[in-house]
Image (cartoon, rainbow, N blue to C red):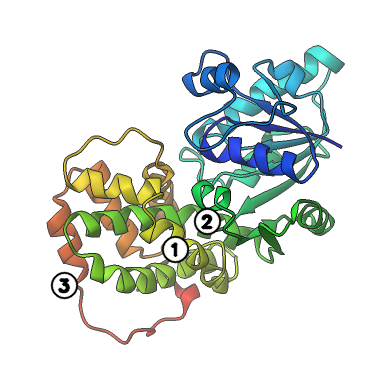
Amino acid sequence: MKITVIGCGRWGTFIAYYLHSIGEDLTLYGKAGDPTTVGLLTERKNSYLTLPDDLHMTTDLYEATDTDTVVISVPSQALRGLFAEIAACDTARRGAPVSRRYILCMKGIEIETGERLSEVTHECAAPGSRVACWIGPGHVEEFLRGVPNCMIIDSDDEALKHELADEFSSPLIRFYYGCDLIGSEIGAAAKNVIGIAAGMLDGFGLSALKGALMSRGTYEISRLIGSMGGDPGSAYGLCHLGDYEATVFSAHSHNRMFGESFVRGEKYTSLAEGYYTVDAIMRLSEKYNVELPICSVVYDILYRGADPKMCLDSLFRREMKDEFWSHPTTGKE
């Protein structure tokens, strides 16, 4: 079965490399003229890995979409636009959009609609398309050193998630079958916001507080998941809490590094999805009437110009209460 991976960033390129290594028939697509794509085309490598000679790469989306399985790893806010391009290619080729297996390997929420990325995909892809999310802990740098990890394939299509997890598993990545698509997607997206908060603590030399941040952050996100109709316990799984080591502590975490750079007044140019996710999450907070103290502080710092030190201090001046005084689905902290 032919697979196309769309996206030549750090993660998309690794996914293509990984799937090729386990025997998949692979094409990697990147936008023409994008510096990352140009580097891969000319040198067959980036700063992390070298692509095998027999891994096909193209900048022609028409060619890339001539397949029944597409793995997507692009910035979350670009997903809807990508589907418009795919639909145009399908119409030119066959006169109508084509249904496929779509595997989403990004973590985010569409800002304008508050939709999860699987919802965007179902809305934009051809009728009959099957959609799954590939999420969980792990950094490219660690995988390339041979360090294994566990990840999740989740979908509202039970057969699809079993199909993909069985197909993509290897000694390097062990997949679990996700049990709650809402929780998996919200948890995966929100952990990037917690990662930014962790970086801010690092920037102020307050790294010892990251244990409290992880505990309270998980509880906070579990309430949001529950209010949205998901299983609050999902926040304690691989999609969120299980991904904290890679996001809250790792030197490879873009979101943690962004948070640290921000409070130090340093420029950071790599993509930090949590920056966009926190905007979307605050809209969900209002829609579902859920208090999200940590996310609110990150939002105020990034979008309202609030003083980072004062905002972080405010989390520790909140009124005293029992640690688990509210049920996760009530929405109140």
> In percent of the image, x 36 and y 60: which residue is there?
249
Of callouts 3 and 2, which one flags the residue occurring earlier in the amino acid sequence? 2
**Measured Cα–Cα span from mark 2 to mark 1:** 10 Å
CB within 8 Å, label 1 to label 3: no
CB within 8 Å, label 3 to label 2: no
Name the residue type under label 3: Arg
The crowding category of the residue bearing disc 2, from other C-alpha atoms within 10 Å (few below 14, some 14 to 19, many at least 20), is many
Q: Secondary structure at mark 1?
A: helix
Q: Which mark is residue 317?
A: 3
Name the residue type under label 2: Ala
Q: Which mark is residue 174?
A: none
**Frontmost residue, 329 versus 234:** 234
The crowding category of the residue bearing disc 3, from other C-alpha atoms within 10 Å (few below 14, some 14 to 19, many at least 20), is few
Q: Secondary structure at mark 3?
A: loop
Of callouts 2 and 1, which one flags the residue occurring earlier in the amino acid sequence? 2
Q: Which mark is residue 244?
A: 1
Q: Quadrant of the C terminus?
A: bottom left
Q: Is residue 222 above or below residue 272?
A: below
Residue 167, given in percent of the width and then of the height, sits at 81, 52
Q: Is residue 291 above or below residue 7?
A: below
For the residues carrying marks 1 and 3, which lies nearer the camera in this image? 1
For the residues carrying marks 3 and 2, which lies nearer the camera in this image? 2
Is 107 displayed left or right of 319 in the figure? right
The crowding category of the residue bearing disc 1, from other C-alpha atoms within 10 Å (few below 14, some 14 to 19, many at least 20), is many
Residue 246 sits in quarter: bottom left
**Measured Cα–Cα span from mark 1 to mark 3:** 25 Å
> In percent of the image, x 76 and y 46: which residue is there?
22
Q: Is residue 287 visible?
A: no
Of callouts 1 and 3, which one flags the residue occurring earlier in the amino acid sequence? 1
> In percent of the image, x 18 and y 58: which residue is there?
311
Q: Which mark is residue 188?
A: 2
Name the residue type under label 1: Tyr
